[in-house]
Image (cartoon, coloured by chain):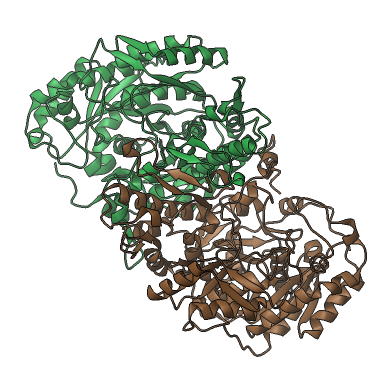
Chain colours: A green, B brown
Amino acid sequence: MNRSPLSDLDIARAADLWPVQRVAEAAGIAVEALEPYGHYAAKVDPQQVQGAARAKVVVVTAVTPTPLGEGKTTTAVGLAQGLAQLGQQAVLTLRQPSLGPTFGVKGGAAGGGYSQVVPMETLNLHLTGDFHAVTSAHNLLAAMTDNHIFHGNALNIDPQTVTWRRVMDMNDRSLRSVVTGLGAPQDGIPRQTGFDITAASEVMVILSLCTSLQDLRQRLGRLVVGFTYAGDPVTAEALGAAGAMTVLLKEAVKPNLMQTLEHTPALIHAGPFGNIATGNSSVVADLLAARLGDYLITEAGFGADMGAERFFNVKCRISGLRPDAAVLVVTVRALKTHSGRYKVTPGKPLPPAMLAENPDDVRAGADNLRKHIQIVQSFGVTPVVAVNVFPGDFPSEHAVIHEVAQAAGARVALATHVTQGGQGALELAQSVIDACKEPGDFRFTYPSEWSLVQKLEAVAQQVYGAGSIELSSAARRDLKRFEALGYGHFPVVIAKTHLSLTSDPQQRGAPTDWTLPVREVRAAVGAGYIYAICGDMRTMPGLSASPAAERIDIDENGEIVGLF
Amino acid sequence: MNRSPLSDLDIARAADLWPVQRVAEAAGIAVEALEPYGHYAAKVDPQQVQGAARAKVVVVTAVTPTPLGEGKTTTAVGLAQGLAQLGQQAVLTLRQPSLGPTFGVKGGAAGGGYSQVVPMETLNLHLTGDFHAVTSAHNLLAAMTDNHIFHGNALNIDPQTVTWRRVMDMNDRSLRSVVTGLGAPQDGIPRQTGFDITAASEVMVILSLCTSLQDLRQRLGRLVVGFTYAGDPVTAEALGAAGAMTVLLKEAVKPNLMQTLEHTPALIHAGPFGNIATGNSSVVADLLAARLGDYLITEAGFGADMGAERFFNVKCRISGLRPDAAVLVVTVRALKTHSGRYKVTPGKPLPPAMLAENPDDVRAGADNLRKHIQIVQSFGVTPVVAVNVFPGDFPSEHAVIHEVAQAAGARVALATHVTQGGQGALELAQSVIDACKEPGDFRFTYPSEWSLVQKLEAVAQQVYGAGSIELSSAARRDLKRFEALGYGHFPVVIAKTHLSLTSDPQQRGAPTDWTLPVREVRAAVGAGYIYAICGDMRTMPGLSASPAAERIDIDENGEIVGLF
């Protein structure tokens, strides 16, 4: 099998796009619900779409990926296209890419080959402005917090406890740690703070988790920016900021309709970080897609331990949707890496030895796949293993994956959607249809009533395969404090590396009997979860010595070059 | 005459809006040129609009305003509506409002009463995202500058000379002066810098002054971020940032079509600051409007000494358009204030004595009007004085304005467009039509070949009425340096208060024989002008103790409240 000689951009440019009105019509979205933004993207007002949720819910996740990623977005797109070719109404829900990485390392994110969301430029640049609205709303709250302290501090905010930073949709390491409020007396109160990338904003998570505009308003009001000298939380509501923040996000709360290369409808909405946040597209888009399609195909960030765990335990708890199947994307290169015999480095070619036919390497890394199948099964969801086929793969290597997956009780399908579009995902689509016919038995890892410590232990042990967790004294103290503040019923998000099932990015395979160290815990009160920091979590990326931006330009015809 | 009892928002909400496609059709814009953003705004691609410039060009300016403003936007909107009622094809070009002030003091900016651009919410919140695109492009250059220094500094940039700050579309005093790059070694190089509001970005000025996407690309490449240790300018081109910045602005360079309450087409595009920048909407929109209409009506920020001077000397020099008439908006309250007998403070009621019938007060302040008429005439442009009528005005006061304007050789018209829409601007519209029939004799204050000092002197003396200018030694040195660097052919922008013809905001009327002190000069090399700082220029506003944002919210139906 060979990849097409055409680049992703060539394929996207050559695409026969439908006007977004036609995509909407085919998806059953009435014209009253549609607000076009240019010719190929539109806001959809969920309140203008009738009907009840009916779709089978399929989440696309993956084994523990290499730093290169294993093609989850592409597989989600390919699967939706494949389902459509089998006569099913499939609707995709995907995260919006962040501008930061687009101009940093990786270029555009829109799937790949013949399984892309188009137009790429629209998707990767601004789209309908939702990220910018999140940036504005987040930074308005920051400005109003500092302004409140400056103008007499009637709420008695202790400036040293203000944890609300500012955000920018940019890779800019110089903003990670800053001192603001310098200059003259009228230039504010000096304070040590910093900027995160917009995808790491709690406002972004709220946009992704709210169920409606009114729910958005309530959640924004609950945002905690810091504490009073007496130790009481200070909310966006108390600062009078939540209303204006909601107004800034009034359009952003509506999902964005785009299309795949085969005109399958794709709702692109919200883009919270996959490490400290939930790494899933929006609840609003899922609820809309569930009313429109026979199949809702959504992608969850990173491996099944990360995005899918949060999809199940956090997002589905809010949306009320019950997932029917989970597609586990696996690649030969990922499992070879999990053998522990190779090291994959972004920006460098794969080690040549990895490219040789070696089913034994795949078998040596198969524990990771087995563990991810078990993770999906632990939620009572039916797994389907999708082998994202690469040109250099060998049938003997695929055979090992087949054997391992089937032995673990999972369906398995080879998928060649990158080179063949939906046609290359027919086997996968049929497997997903079959999987969705199995009786559902969806369950959370823990009930809301459990203590926060119990919830952390449950995820660490039942999902990650850890033997135990180790709480720092600060974490232990803060968990107690959070429960006293009434946050005990929240679900938990564990912020750890996505490059290992453990909290150590160097650990391959599926380690057991290890200890998850919880250094620190924080409360995302507006979003509605507690997150535990296990390892170094970067919330503002930097640019490399040769950032992608240097290669991005317009040509003499005004066309974009170098974006992909 | 009474103002309508309905609020601006009531009127706007009750408006019978046309779909933007119908506005476009009526304006002669083909459907291929239109990219709708929602139902009531659209991008217009100027390359898809045929025809040659044919419109009469009318700039709406004002006497030296009170801090409350004298209704220029409203008058521009009313005039366009009035011209349409007289059977003329009128096209408005206006600046996009900034989010910062919307959430700060003044609420929305869209005209007022029955002379508004609608929908207000769309105009005042995000619109099509152009300001956000400017923010992104500006901050990408900042990130790439710091990143270049961090990764070995191959260009030998002296970090102490970096003048390129960051921007945010927010009133946030805490960001005026900051130290970035703190933290660990991988978190960048510590540097003292700050944030300006997006409207103060040179990228915003470039967006407003460029003639096309390719011209935008060239100007962005010429942006200077700082200097090498050897004293050579470091450009965005050298940093490899200009291409990516252009890509971020690719849609922003297209004007945005909206409508007035009477469906007159309004091109809303760019919004550079009126103090340190040009304070005018875009050249691209003017060139487009000149091809679409019989009359191009544009507004220039602040008084005729400020925005109109720059419109003539900077913007028209680039666009090549030759203005036919200038409307000078005047109010009774402004001239009473110029008597020096009253003090007007924003947020407080007018002094009660100002509301009494007192034509003598108006006469005592009339020098300011005479001077602004002379400023317009000095450019060879025909002035039309528009009295923006307020409910408490007295006919005897209007009579003084009539007498003064006519004695100075200007047409004059009472305008009641706020309460009556276009119907209230018919007299003004007819006066403008008559003025545009006079033979044109447009001329700049100075030719491009003059030295920078000569240009500054010419504006100060011939436009402001100063006796002389006084250059600080630093300003004198930098002007020589700029000429050595090849910037000598640039026009000049003098950054001074808009509340006086002088550089002292306390000076009312039309002082003569005063000296303009030039403290500092800077080069906007991408935008293509030199600007002289005369007085304290704030480039990042702050929020008040009770910012407008606190009153902005959604109601139980999801409708915006408190924005206006």
In the rendering, at what x and y percent does residue A56 appear? 41, 26
Judge left or right: residue A378 versus residue A288.
left
Would you place residue A452 above or below residue B234 in this image?
Answer: above
In the rendering, at what x and y percent does residue A394 appear? 10, 33
Image quarter in which the N terminus of chain A is found = top left
Judge left or right: residue A202 versus residue B183.
right
Whether residue B32 is visible to the viewer of this picture, yes or no, is no
Residue at figure coordinates x 34%, y 56% from the top left: B158
Judge left or right: residue B156 versus residue B251.
left
Residue at figure coordinates x 78%, y 76% from the top left: B367
Q: Closest to the observer: A561 or B366?
A: B366
Q: Closest to the observer: A197 or B528?
A: B528
Whether residue A36 is visible to the viewer of this picture, yes or no, is yes
Would you place residue A260 above or below residue A448 in this image?
Answer: below
| Residue reaching furthest to the front | B473
Task: Give the mark count.
Answer: 0
Residue at figure coordinates x 62%, y 89% from the top left: B441
In the rendering, at what x and y percent does residue B97 appear? 61, 56
Would you place residue A563 above or below residue B299 in this image?
Answer: above
Residue at figure coordinates x 51%, y 56% from the top left: B130
Examine the image and state in which quarter residue A75 appears: top left
In the rendering, at what x and y percent does residue A146 appear? 59, 37
Q: Closest to the observer: A45 or A341?
A: A341
Q: Closest to the observer: A462 or A434?
A: A462
